[in-house]
Image (tube, grey):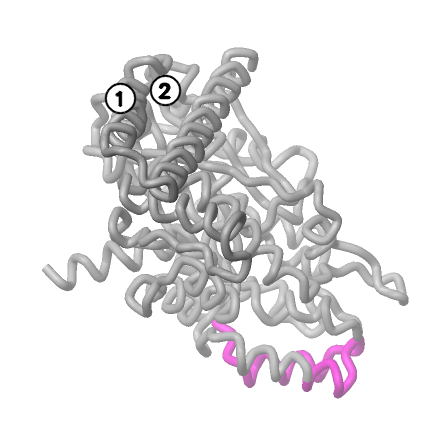
Amino acid sequence: MAPLVSKQIVSTLSRSLGLLLLILVTSFEALFLLQKSPPIFHLINLSCFTIFFILKPYLSKKTYKIYLVDFSCLKPPSHYKVPFSKFLKNSSMIKGFDSESVAFMANILASSGQSQETYLPPALHHIPPKTHHHEYIKEVHMVRFPVMDDLLAKTKLSPQDIDILIVNCSGFNPTPSLTSIVINHYSMRSDIKSFNLSGMGCSAGALGIDLGQNLLQIQKNSKAVVLSTEILSTGWYAGHEKPKLILNCLFRMGSAAILLTNKNQTSKHPKYELFKTLRTNKSYDDRAYLSTIREEDSEGKLGVTIKRDLLQVAGETLRANVTILGSSVLPLSEKFWHGISIIRKRFLNKSAEIYVPNFKSVIEHFCLLASGRPVIREIGKGLKLGDREMEAAVMTLHRFGNQSSSALWYELAYLEGKECEER
């Protein structure tokens, strides 16, 4: 993995250098404006900045283009649907819940933004729910294999053509591993490189793509499959603590399979080219670290606690992420005004607002975190997005509920479907 680490270090240094140069240029420009310096100073300052970004691609190490060939999303059978009335009726018959717990879940469902047609696995339709290891494995087969079969059919590939397999699931990590289950089922090659991602929640789908991109940068002429899902029967909570009951109400079935490659020629023309991935890790911050945590309640019942800090932490992480991302994708004018607003707030007027760049000028479609209506609204507000830009997340949440790490791909499928309709 040394070449991969080296590439990551070079990439990080390159981004940091670019950001530092942007700050320096913006600072000098502000200073020149305040001191009413001659135009030649402005010209030299901006020329240096422009020359750096023109030469930057040629000074960087060679990288391979990464393509997203195709993807598949799971649509569970209709008899897996759980209308609110059925969910609440079943819950009222489960011994672990009291009337207050059921009433709380009813309020969460009513304000969740999801419809009456979301899905739960068969194990959670029983009274009481079947939360045994055997049921977890059955759910793995139920959500993994159909999307993998569909992806292989779409791309006309054999399982033996896959060089890299990445599987993400936050709450279930069996032995044999989830990748081993897939490799065994499809009789994949003995030299396939396999990776399991766990405990990463809703972000794991995007993190799997980031890992796949990095691996494809060091392994030529390869194909990588990312399988993204959550096993819901492992996360069911039958207790009284309200922060742990939220998970029962919001998370619903979903699964996706994605094919990445660095090959220029494939049997199917790629749908997309992967331009950039970016990770911002806030685990060092206790507030972020503890915002969602799996733990036992006072009665020893295991559940996932979702704290109020989660929304604020998500907003802060997004702002940090977007600041770095903006330096790579935004036009020079947007970077300039953003930089000027930071300097003004820091040195001239601490009450002034920082200018939020117009990301709509370079990004046509947005796939936002579909964890709930408040989260979608918060993200949209932070990026100054309108209803059109938030539509894919809102409609995916409405139709399928919060599908954790695989929701991204349902949003992309929604955007593709809408684009075809508009044509």
User: What x and y, as percent, mark residue 357?
Assistant: 35, 52
Quarter in which the C terminus is drawn: bottom left
Front disc: 1 or 2: 1
Amino acid type of disc 1? Ile
Residue 247, quarter of the rendered image: bottom right
User: What x and y, as percent, mark residue 337?
Assistant: 34, 48
Looking at this view, name the residue that lies furthest to the right: 299
> Can residue 80 be seen here?
no
Magenta residues?
81-103
Residue at 31%, 21% in the rendered image: 52
Q: Which mark is residue 222?
A: 2
Q: Going by the image, does 28 lie left or right of 296?
A: left
User: What x and y, as percent, mark residue 257?
Assistant: 41, 42
Q: Going by the image, does 405 lie left or right of 294?
A: left
Query: As rendered, which of 219 and 50 lies closer to the eye?
Result: 50
Query: As rendered, which of 92 and 103 lies closer to the eye?
Result: 103
Whichever of labels 1 and 2 marks the residue nearer the N terminus, that label is: 1
Residue 305, quarter of the rendered image: bottom right
**Crowdedness of circle 1 by 10 Å Cα count: few (<14), some, many (20+)?**
few
Q: Residue 60 in magenta?
A: no
**Distance (Cα) linking label 1 and label 2:** 35 Å
User: What x and y, as percent, mark residue 88?
Assistant: 62, 82
Query: As rendered, which of 228 and 339 lies closer to the eye?
Result: 339
Query: As rendered, which of 383 and 338 lies closer to the eye?
Result: 338
Q: Residue 87 in magenta?
A: yes
Looking at this view, name the residue that lies furthest to the left: 423
Residue at 36%, 57% in the rendered image: 411
Determine the secondary structure under disc 2: loop
Q: Which residue is mark 1?
A: 51
Amino acid type of disc 2? Ser
Quarter in which the N terminus is drawn: top right
